[in-house]
Amino acid sequence: MNPFDLAPGRPVVLYLHEPKEKIWGLLISIGAPGIVVRGIDIAVFDDWMRQEMRGDEPLIGLVTSFYPIHRLERMELDQTIGPLLSYADRFFEETGKSVLEAAGLPTAEEVGPPPCRTTE
């Protein structure tokens, strides 16, 4: 696997400027104009996780947002490193469900393999 695989559905952390923001989200797409994620401000990630864990009425949730590329300072894959769990892994440990499931996005198992191309 490519260590910086930017496939849709990968959890990422965005560092934005003007205004300064830190966003955790699931990558939808990235291109020259900008980046689209289904995510949440990292400051309320734990509140969202607790809400999902308790099964509360959704007051906090993920939103699909576009960020122009000129605002992107840095992007990191959300990865577990040694004993430090990624946000996605922490979410799974606390809630018992994947972030894809909580976001309402299809998992790899639901999507299945890519269609075969045939030549005629």
Image (cartoon, helix red, strand yellow):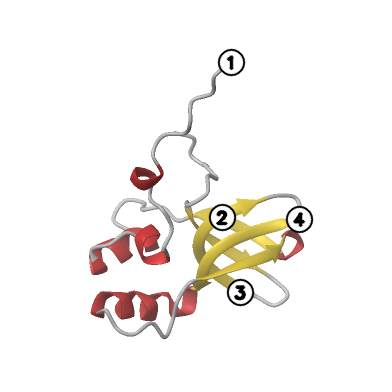
* Residue assigned mark 1: 119
Q: Nearer the viewer, mark 3 or mark 1?
A: 1
Furthest residue in direction front, as rendered: 120
Mark 3 surroundings within 10 Å by alpha-carbon count, few (fewer than 14), some (14 through 19), many (20 or more): some
Give the mark nearer the N terminus: 2 vs 1: 2
**Secondary element type, mark 3:** strand
Q: Residue at x 59, y 56 (%)?
A: 75
Give the mark nearer the N terminus: 4 vs 1: 4
Q: Position of residue 42 (x, y in %)?
A: 48, 73
* Residue assigned mark 2: 28
* Residue assigned mark 4: 33
Q: Amino acid at mark 2?
A: Ile
Residue 85 in view: no
Q: CA separation, marks 2 and 1?
A: 30 Å
Q: CA separation, marks 4 and 2?
A: 14 Å
Q: Nearer the viewer, mark 3 or mark 2?
A: 2
Horizontal placement of 53 versus 1: left or right?
Answer: left
* Residue assigned mark 3: 21
Q: Residue at x 69, y 71 (%)?
A: 17
Q: Amino acid at mark 4?
A: Pro
Give the mark nearer the N terminus: 3 vs 1: 3
Q: Position of residue 8 (x, y in %)?
A: 52, 49
Q: Position of residue 102 (x, y in %)?
A: 36, 66
In depth, the one of 6 and 58 nearer the eye is 58
Mark 2 surroundings within 10 Å by alpha-carbon count, few (fewer than 14), some (14 through 19), many (20 or more): many
Q: CA separation, marks 3 and 2?
A: 19 Å
The quadrant where residue 19 appears: bottom right
- Tell whether label 1 touches label 2 (CB within 8 Å): no
Q: Amino acid at mark 3?
A: Glu
In depth, the one of 89 and 81 nearer the eye is 89
Q: Amino acid at mark 1?
A: Thr
